[in-house]
Image (cartoon, rainbow, N blue to C red):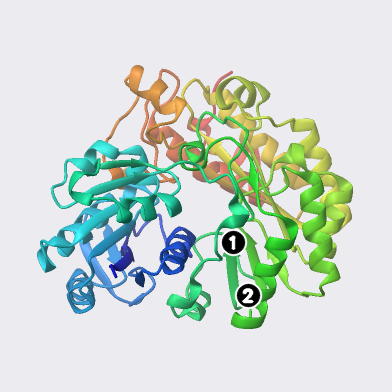
Amino acid sequence: MKKVLLIYPPTTIEVKVERKRVGIPNGIFAIAAVLVQEGYKVKILDATLEDFGHEEEIGQGFIRFGMSFAKIKEVISGYAPDVVGVSSLYSSQACNVHEVCRLAKEASKEILTVVGGGYPTSETQKCLDDPNIDFVVRGEGERAIINLLRDDLGHHQKIVDAPFIEDVNSLPLPARHLVDFAKYSSVPCAHGVIKHKPFASLFSSRGCPFNCSFCFSFRMHGTKFRARSPENILDEIELLIKDYGVKEIHFEDDNLTFDRQRALEVFQGMIDRKFNISWMAPSGLSVNKLDKELLLKMKESGCYAIIIAIESGNQRVLSEIMHKPVDLKRAEEIVRFLKEIELDVASYWMIGLPGETKREIFDTIDFAAKLKSINPNFYSSFSIFTPFKGTPLYDVCLNNKYLTSNNFSKMKYSTGVIDTEDFSHQWVEKVRYEGWLKANHAKSEEEVDSSLIPKN
């Protein structure tokens, strides 16, 4: 029987712009579940969660928190796995991924190392160039890891392109029992806010049919919407309540309400089964996939806040640059109705895209402020466009030589990394903060730094 150790590495942050937070590594739990189902012996090490209080300064204003590399090596050596799998969502954490793989090989040259997640999927060659990485899994890893371990690894291709799993109902529930799951409710949450603890997160679907030009999700989960059945989802929530005492659920779907009827059945099922829990969808909901009946049912089933991903307050930017199906008039209607039914609401906004003008960036800030005037409980979260490799807008940036850095650690939502004919990355960084003040604290145009405001 092969022994598998799945590791989520410690996390590096830039102290002045980021806070220490922990996300629930649902991908690792999902892969662990299929491995256990197939008879493998599996251990999970979330090195960001474990030793959360431990910090190491690594220079230039950055720290790494979580389990030290020395302790990680001790865990690897003590468990003596045949395979070490390392998960990495973001390119900004690439250094930690490579270091964990190096530690595995240092513990034993016989250990096979496999990496998967957003970073290896987008930066495959960088992973292949590392002699400490044996295999790269791109896409959804549950079936791929099983096929990989069954094969003659000595003759297996280094790149494993994972097919999208059509029947997501066939997957076992995530193997949360392999960790002390309650710990995730004792540390700051990386995604969304928490009203009640303990909490858990889950995916009720995979794939988003929208083709937003800035989004990397299609590379991981495709554009075909593949949904779990309402009963399958409700059974998982019921298990979380009974076995883990969960009082809040975070739906991490890219597009929870894409299938309106399915969404209604899930929310009605939560009511009928008397779950009496709170919930939200921190990844954001599509404005064009919400209506009054759906919102009322969401509130009745325990939803306490709505996050909508409007992204821009300029229709041209939405339609021609982002390719995002959002109607701004529809967004206004939704925000007004949420005020009526007393549901808190927030929106994600993105500024600094290639092809966007300074005036259009301020259109977004102005529209966010307008929504705040309509609904005092409206909150805006501003991000700076990040050119993820593998997305159409990354290619635009590359072809036009807009990129100012290839440093993965700089690829963060608070940091600009492109200079265009219209703006510099320094200007966008300043505007992001001024925009946040204006949109959330009713700061007038006169109070905004006049040097930032475009003349026309």
Quote the CA–CA distance across marks 2 and 1.
10 Å
Which of the image's four quarters has the N terminus? bottom left
* Nearer the observer, 382 or 168: 168
Label placed on residue 131: none
Residue located at (77% from left, 52% from top): 263
Q: Residues within 10 Å of mark 2 (few under 14, many from 20)?
A: many
Q: Which residue is mark 1?
A: 202
Label placed on residue 240: 2
Q: Position of residue 167 (x, y in %)?
A: 60, 49
Q: Position of residue 379 (x, y in %)?
A: 67, 52
SS assignment at label 2 = helix
Residue located at (68% from left, 46% from top): 285
The answer to whether residue 375 is visible is: no
- Is 113 on the left-hand or right-hand side of 314? left
Residue located at (89% from left, 53% from top): 340
Q: Quadrant of residue 108?
A: bottom left
* Nearer the observer, 84 or 15: 84
- Earlier in the chain: of badge 2 and badge 1, it is 1
Q: Amino acid at mark 1?
A: Leu
Q: Position of residue 32 (x, y in %)?
A: 42, 65
User: Relative to 428, does residue 383 appear above or below in the rendering?
Assistant: below
User: Relative to 307, does residue 42 appear above or below in the rendering?
Assistant: below
The answer to whether residue 326 is visible is: yes
Q: Position of residue 354 (x, y in %)?
A: 46, 24
SS assignment at label 1 = strand
Q: Quadrant of residue 314?
A: top right
- Is 122 on the left-hand or right-hand side of 275? left
Which of the image's four quarters has the C terminus? top right
- Is 226 on the left-hand or right-hand side of 153? right
* Nearer the observer, 397 or 161: 161
- Is 204 on the left-hand or right-hand side of 78? right
